[in-house]
Amino acid sequence: MINPFVTLAQKLSMLRHPDVAPTRILSLESMRKATVFLDNEDADADPARRELQQFFRLYGIEVRFLCPQKYELNWYGKMKKARPHKGEPPEDIDDDLFLSLAGPDNFAACYEARYSHAKFKVGIFPMEGNVYDLVIIGQKSDDVLSRQTVYIPTIKDILQKIK
């Protein structure tokens, strides 16, 4: 059971900062930097990271992975890394792509997706407020070990088809 104080803190955190970054669909050829959020709780985080690293390398896209451990999250599930202070540009200001392979129960992934400055956002579940430009909805798998890697072939195929 989720603590109601944690739920309240998560909702307040999401309301504090409006999502103002305009997004659009981009082709792989126009991308230079990407951020990928992986769920470290899933056993396939490392294979997913390797596969995506190899894929983006083929297109010359610099990729940054966010895979926070429990100790890197605050008490209500947000990443402890601080967003920049006023006047400083965020790390993801030049990102062309934000790709989240974490599920809807991962608050850190939801928070990062909403406040990412990436021009093109891709996720595996729809979020309130239409945060993602592209949502890849797969079949629910009973195999917990393949949760993230199941989406990768479809994501790669769709990204390659966008011109």
Image: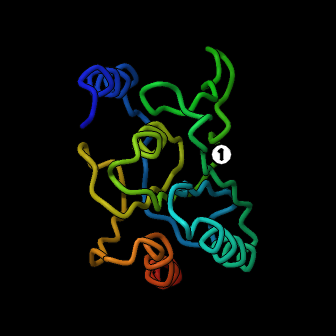
User: Percent position (x, y) of residue 118?
Assistant: 53, 48
For image coordinates 47% across by 40% down, the residue present is 108
Q: Which residue is mark 1?
A: 94
The colour scheme applied to this rendered structure is: rainbow
For image coordinates 60% across by 45% down, the residue present is 68
User: Percent position (x, y) of residue 155?
Assistant: 46, 76
Tag 1: amino acid: Asp
Considering depth in this image, is 59 or 135 the residue closer to the camera? 135
Query: In the shown orientation, is residue 81 left or right of residue 12?
Result: right
How crowded pointer 1 is (Cα within 10 Å; few <14, some 14-19, many 20+) is rated as some
User: Percent position (x, y) of residue 27?
Assistant: 54, 71
Query: In the shown orientation, is residue 122 left or right of residue 88?
Result: left
Query: In the shown orientation, is residue 159 left or right of residue 92?
Result: left
For image coordinates 25% across by 43% down, the residue present is 129
> Residue lying furthest top in this view?
86
Query: In the shown orientation, is residue 147 left or right of residue 97?
Result: left
For mark 1, give the secondary structure.
loop
- Up/down of 11 relative to 162, above or below: above
- Quadrant assignment, res 80: top right
User: Percent position (x, y) of residue 25?
Assistant: 44, 63
